[in-house]
Every structure is written in C-alpha cells, then in structure tokens.
Amino acid sequence: MKKKVFALLLCGIPLLINAQDAFDVLQMSQTELRGTSRFQSMAGAFGALGGDLSTLTQNPAGIGVYRSSDLGITFSLDFNSTKAGVDKLNETKFNVNNVGYVGSIRLNSESVPNLNFGFTYNRLQSFNRHYIGGVGSIPTSMSNFIADEFVNMPGYSERDLYWTDDFNPYFDGYAPWAAVTTYDMKTNNGGYVGIINANNDYMQGLFGQGTRGDAYYEVDERGHADEYNIAFGGNIANKLYFGLDFGILDLDYRSFQSYEEDLTNAYVMADDGDLLLSPIVNDNTRADWGLYNHLHSEGTGVNFKLGLIWRPVQALRIGAAFHTPTYYDMRDTYYVNASLKAYQDGNMLYSAHKGSNDGYDYSSTYTIKTPWHFMGSVAGVIGTSGIVSLDYEYVANETMRIGDDRNNDYPDVTDNVKNYFKPSHIIRIGGEYRLNPNWSLRAGYSYKTTQVEKGVDNYDYNIATVGTNPAYQYDNSVQNITCGVGYRYKKFYTDLAYVHKIRTSVYNAFSPINDQYGYEPNVSADVKDHNNRFSLTLGMRF
C-alpha cells in the first residue's frame, strides 16, 4: 500500500499533545536534602535557627542571625543503589553542593544592630538514577494500551495514523502520541506493518487470547536542578529576624527510557505485503518489539522567598517561611523510535522500525510553575551546649501548572494535576551537642509523604501522558537519616556529614485501563533507592 501523508494535519495542534504533562512537572519540581554539611547532618531542620549558608534556600530570615561574614564551600560523594524487582544497579557521583558568602554590616544601633546580604549556589536536586528490571507473565501488552487509547479517542480514524518518517510526535497530527509511532512501520521487505493494526472496526494490539510474554524496562536519568540565591536580611532588637531571597534556577534533565516485550502466540500481520489481511494468532507466532524514548529538558526559572524568625526568649526560636512557585521557561529536545520483529514457525516474517523525524531530534518550548511551599519551625537552645530543632513543610503539589511559551496554562493538564496530586508533608528534626568550644556532634531525621492521590496508587485512574512515552513514576516516601561532626578553630571551620536516603517509588510502564469494559492491569514495579552521601564543608567567618 502506498505511503499516505495528510499534510492538512499540520494545521491543528490539539491540547492532547502538549510538551509535558502532570507527572513530568512533578519530576521537575522536586527538591532533596542538600546544602552545607552542618545543614545536612541535622536533616535540614534549620527553619528557626539560621546562621548557615543553606538557610538562604530554606528560611531566608536565617541570614539575619549572622553577626559576622561567612564564606564556605561544600563537597559531597554519593553512593547510590537502585533496585527494581530483583535487579540492582550501583553508581557513584561527586558533587559540589553549596558555595556561599554572607556579608554582615554592623549598624551599631540597638533597634537594628546589623543588615546582612548573601550570595549562594545550592544544588537542589540530582536527577541521577538508573534502574532496569523485568516482569514475567505480563497480564497485557503496551501495544494493547496504545490501541485502546486510540479507540477511546472519539473522532479518529485509521487514516489519521499514516505518517512519513519525519513526523513530530508532539505536534504533528491529531492522533494520540504513541499510536502514530507504532503504526505503519516500514519493514525490511519494503512493506508496512504495525505494532497496532486495524482489525475490521477496531485497533488490535499484539496481545490476545492465548498470548503470553515478558516485559523488560530500563530508565536512565541524569541531570540536576541548581539554585543561585541573592538574599538580604537583618534583625530588629535581636528579637525579630527577617529575610528576603531571590532565586535563579538552572535545570537540566536527560532521560532514556526503553520498554520491550517478548510475546508468544502474538497477534501479528501474516504478510506485510497485503495489509488487507487481519492479524493472526497461533502457537507458532512470536513478536519481539520495543519503544525507546530520549528526552532532554532544560530551563531557567525564578522564585522568591520570605522568612521570619522570632526569639521571644533566649531558649526559644520560632520560624516561618513562604516560597513562591518557581516559574520556569523550558525547552525539550526529544526523539523516539519503535522496532518490531515478527516470527512464524521459527522463521522471521519481517523486521520493522519507525522513528520520529527520520532519526533527528525535535524540540518544543513551554512553561512550568512548581508548587508553593510553606514552612513552620521551632527550636530550643539549651544553654551553650545543645540545640533541638523541628521543621514542618507543606508542599502544595496540586497548584503545579504547565503552559505554552506565552504563559497560557493548558487546562487539560491543570485538571490532571488536580486529580492526580495532593499536598505532601515534610517533617525534619535535628539536634546538635557542643562537646567543647571546638567540637560538635549532630544528628537528624526527615520524612516526606507521597504526592499522589490514593486513586493513583490504587490504579483507579487512566493516567494521561504526552509525546510517545506512556511511562510514569512517583515517590511513595522519602526518608533521610543523618549525622555529622563539626570543628571550629578561630575563624576557620570544617563540618562532616553522613546522609542515608531511602526512597520508595513506583514505576509504571503505562497506565491501567478502567472503562465500561472493566479493569485491565498494567506493567509496574516497585523501585527502591538507597543513597549514602558523605559531605565535607570548609569555611571561615570573619
């Protein structure tokens, strides 16, 4: 059959195929426990304390606590272990977590003793994670999911799936994301077949009655989110400390995700030279196929932070801080390709492939608004020897937004964000004990709750994704167990921290389908990270 190109499809760009969707903005909005070694060793419970370079990213009122200038740099070495199913991968990564300077201007006034300013660089998040896994005896195929999604979209016909190899899966045509990629693929014999195929009046996936198979997945993520802070603050009568921070953010995220299936008794085309034949299935057919997605997201953003710390008595500190959303201007570069090998009676029928833009990257621009944050803190100071501090942070995940490059929100994505996500809560507790004027011991613990609604975790929703990657993932919980030691000598100080991070996540290769025909399960796996970080800070106060 001749290749058909419907150029008129270029005239329409539906909301269905935005650059990113709800789980993508969730990925870009996360932060983790990083900063100076003192800050990390107390699990970041510094909202009511201040006097540390990391507080500029947390409660900027902490800059008002300074009575002298501070200059420091923090290095870390991360040993990460990620396990999905029975497969485990280990990685080691060196980072510079924090570089900062705070200058203090003494005013010699009882009402306003000093005004301070500061500049810091902080690594907010490392995206580095790599895991692989397999699922045996899968209950269905991603190809069925793709076919079902196409059937469920009203107003589409088979002809909307025909496209040349230079199609852009994010912007060309009216058909759903991965459907074009997996239909009308060019074979080594010069014909065209699909991973999904038309079978009379419906679309047929590879999985049917009597089909069995296994799935294999790989997720390789790289990149970082860094923040550059400019802060100003001071104190009033040594009772009320205030601070204002302006943050400039740099985000760089790279991802390779592959998903493959090995199916026996698969529904495949019997002859790629005659597309009028319906797919067949028997005991002697086999299909090996895969979908491979490459994504590079990069952007710059800005935010503001306001904070207060009140010291009613010497032994008590109370803090509060508000973070505006970060407003990102983003650019994505992406590429996808799909492959299929079909066999019958042990002989290869054909191999087929298809890639977006004939093998070259496409790009798009858009905007992201991350959640706003509120922090409340309290700390007790025990003479000159001890500190105990408690922080609570509220993260309004349901306020995240994605829009076009003119800052117009996508209403469909907004609805998904509201349906999928709920506020997450972070509790941090930390303590410090000063052994003598030179040496201090520290420890802490933090816990972060899940961001997703119960219905997402229970597979009650059909999860919408965009582009050509139907996979999505989210965290169920994040814990940090921390400890450290500090040494002071005259103007110089050094701090050492150890952080053990435990993160439990869920990977879904594609959404389950819940409709009037019943529930069809998906392919998913539990993912667990164990990160061991050693961090060293060197600094001086003058």
Image (tube, helix red, strand yellow):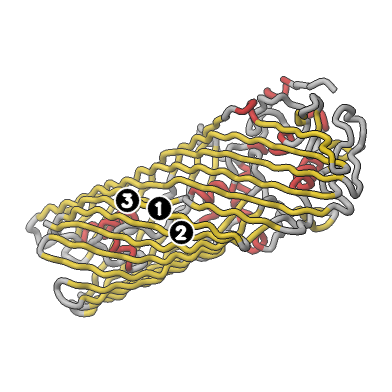
Query: Gap in Å between the C-alphas at discs 3 and 1?
Result: 10 Å
Judge from the rendering whether residue 285 lies leftward or rightward of residue 50; answer left or right: right
- Between discs 2 and 1, the one toward the N terminus: 2
Residue 390's image quarter?
bottom left
* Tag 3: amino acid: Val
| Residue tagged 2 | 80
Q: Residue at x 30, y 52 (%)?
A: 98
Q: Give the image location of residue 536, x and y in percent.
A: 28, 60
**Is residue 422 visible to us here?**
no
Dot 2 and dot 3 residues touching (CB under 8 Å): no
* Tag 2: amino acid: Asn
Query: Gap in Å between the C-alphas at discs 2 and 1?
Result: 8 Å
| Residue tagged 1 | 93
Q: Nearer the viewer, residue 167 or 518?
A: 167
Q: Residue at x 30, y 50 (%)?
A: 245
SS label for mark 2: strand
Q: Residue at x 89, y 39 (%)?
A: 279
Q: Nearer the viewer, residue 118 or 40?
A: 40
SS label for mark 3: strand
SS label for mark 1: strand
Query: Gap in Å between the C-alphas at discs 2 and 3?
Result: 16 Å
Judge from the rendering whether residue 493 lies leftward or rightward of residue 229; answer left or right: left
| Residue tagged 3 | 96
The quadrant in which the N terminus is found is top right
